Image (spheres, coloured by chain):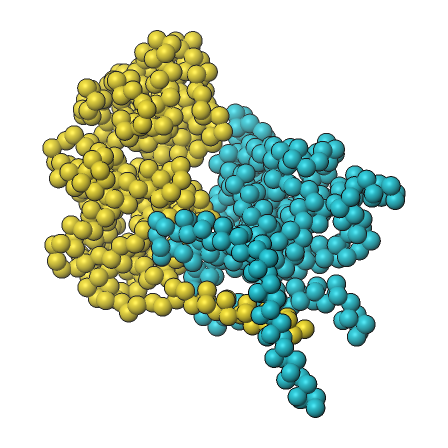
Chain colours: A yellow, B cyan
Amino acid sequence: MKKFTALMLAMLMVMSLLAGCGSSKPAADASTIKIGMSGPLTGGAAVYGKAVEAGMKIAVEEINAKGGLKIEFQSQDDEHDGEKALNAYNNLKDWGMQFFAGAVTTAPCLSIAPTAVEDNIFMMTPSGSSDKIPMTGNNIFQMCFTDPNQGASAAELVAELNMAQNIGIIFDNSDDYSKGLMNGFKTKAAELGLNIVCETNFTADNKTDLSTQVTQCKDAGCDFVFLPFYATEASQVLTQAAKIGYEPTFFGCDGMDGVLTIEGFDKSLAEGLVLMTPFNPDAPETQDFVSKYQAMMNGETPNQFAADGYDVIYAIYDACVAAGVDGTTAPSDACEMLKTYFATNEFSGLTGSGMTWDEQGMISKIPAAVVIENGKYVALG
Amino acid sequence: MKKLLNNKNTRSNLVIYLVVTVFFLVMQGMNMGGMLTSSWKGFLVPICVYISLAVSLNLLVGICGELSLGHAGFMGIGAFAGIVVAALLQDAVALEPLRLFIAMIVGGVLAGAAGFLIGIPVLRLRGDYLAIVTLAFGEILKNIVGNLYVGLDAEGVHVSATSAKFTLLEGGKMILDGPVGATGIKKLATFPMGFVLVLITLFVVLNLVNSKEGRAIKAVRDNRIAAESVGINVTAFRMKAFVVSAFLAGMAGALFGLNYSSMAASKFNFNTSINILVFVVLGGMGNILGSVISATVLYVLPEALRSLEDYRMILYAVVLILVMLFTWSPRVKEFVSVVTDKISGIFKKKEVETNG
């Protein structure tokens, strides 16, 4: 029994030590607002988390250099996992976060959003694009398009520019993003009378070889293939198509952004690829951001994720300045003030101008597409 | 009563129950008093889940001596069964804790049934082969639950393995959406229920270990041939351990699934299985209290290290290696026993003084 008492005492001491960690909240400073972000900074999806984080850091540095209202920024790793994401969010709350500028990927967003609604903390995700995210509550905002909306505008673009006779679709059946885009595209395509002749899919477990799907599209005689998924998988489709001498128009969405920076991928295969992206790193008005990003990330060209992150920080900052939110405003009050602000005001940034949000927090902005020519993005149409 | 307390097994069991009860009371008290940070509030239920998973796996790995790498598969079955049951009973059972408990039982039973079916072919194997086959079955279970489409509408429940013809009536609700998993889950899990789960797990495992069956299971682990020669049905006892372990993992999984608002099947992959195995190995094979403590500490550790940002996972790995090295070194063991003897010596002296 003595041994047990000793053990208990030791355990209690360890527990109290652990419980003491991070519970010290520093006093709020009126001149500094606190923005927290979570994203996959390690693991398979780290490329997106790192890009958003860097974009946000650039915005924070610019704002803090300006003077006036300052921003304190903290990013936490969620490993693209719902469970870890909630832990990251709770950790940021303990830090005293007023606004949550995350999460980067959809699954963590869906895990955090109901808690953010409960806490009434203003949340604006730079790149979590499922329509389920803003539908969770009216304090959840998006900087990117929702998937079905983007899919629909892709179909509109295809019809407008008369790009396709026979359409093939390859999608990732295990991915919300991919399925959302596909459904939006299909519904709109049917409305516009576009001809879909082949529809095939893969899942996360068998995405290392996509030759079957590419061959299916070729055999069905598609002259246009819609690829609603990320750049890594797309690079495989392009490589495979080149191998069997298949040259339709490939059309991707914003997840395709970054296809030119994939290691071990022959960039010449991406020539002629069309993709929808709100951000063009080769446009003159984005050059300042691009050079800052390259200085921070060893010469890497920023993608749309970085630009979305940059815009989220500016959107929150602009709203705070206009609505008179400062570092002492309680997160819940700040949330109400920002909601009222975004209901009537518009925002212009790197990923578009005149963006507005509806009462659900869904964004509306003009879709833009680019085509890859000589390894550069060129605006389409 | 005194006789009972003198029994070494009963005494060490009581210690385990006391440790978890004190931990629960302290945490619950701090939670009620608003002294817990948001992070800690978020840890409470997962800690209970992982304790339960580690203890149930310890039954298989430590007590039965069979290395299983598919524990997360059973957890996944339990999680998705629990989510579906809780969603279906949304209107039928208004009382939330009761609904949660029913979901946990159903999750446990289904996982146990899956454990039985898998056990038939798997338990013909031993050692490394068993480890590899359980790994494969864990992945199969993950893929099965990851390809189920379950929806509820005015016509009733719809279940399908393909999304092709799966349509719901207007106002219908998708419960499981294939590989995307479940979204918009109503969170039912609470810390007291987590504590109940841990108690159930401990009660089942400790009683099994100290029963006639438990001794037979240990005999099979220590010497299969000798056990067979005295008339122990080896396969039946291994099966018993396997099914009980799967059942408990299923219950834990159901609680886990109902603690988050979205859940995808990919969560229950090989990595999660290994994670649980790490809890067991670090806590000590066959050491139930060890599993309880290591699951708690190792779950909290990477989260408590968040302030180190990029270095936290490196530090976590370093801690694992150090713990492994130190707890198994004979010198450290000797040192620990000297220290604990000294501390208990102080108490003993005091007792003698007060008695005298």
Q: Is residue A219 visible?
A: yes
Going 46% across and 67% down the picture, which residue do you hit?
Answer: A17
Q: Is residue B169 visible?
A: no
Is B269 above or below relative to A222?
below
Q: Which quadrant of the figure has residue B287? A: bottom right
Residue A173 picture location, percent across and down: 46, 28
Residue A239 picture location, percent across and down: 35, 17
Q: Nearer the viewer, residue B25 or B15?
A: B15
Left or right, B224 with reference to B16:
right
Q: Nearer the viewer, residue B252 or A165?
A: B252
Going 23% across and 67% down the picture, which residue do you hit?
Answer: A29
Q: Which quadrant of the figure has residue A268? A: top left
Is B4 above or below relative to A171?
below
Left or right, B135 with reference to A182:
right
- The C terminus of chain B: image quadrant: bottom right
Residue A100 picture location, percent across and down: 32, 53
Which residue extends farthest bottom?
Answer: B356
Going 51% across and 47% down the picture, which residue do you hit?
Answer: B185
Going 18% across and 40% down the picture, which residue do you hit?
Answer: A295
Is B347 above or below relative to B338?
below
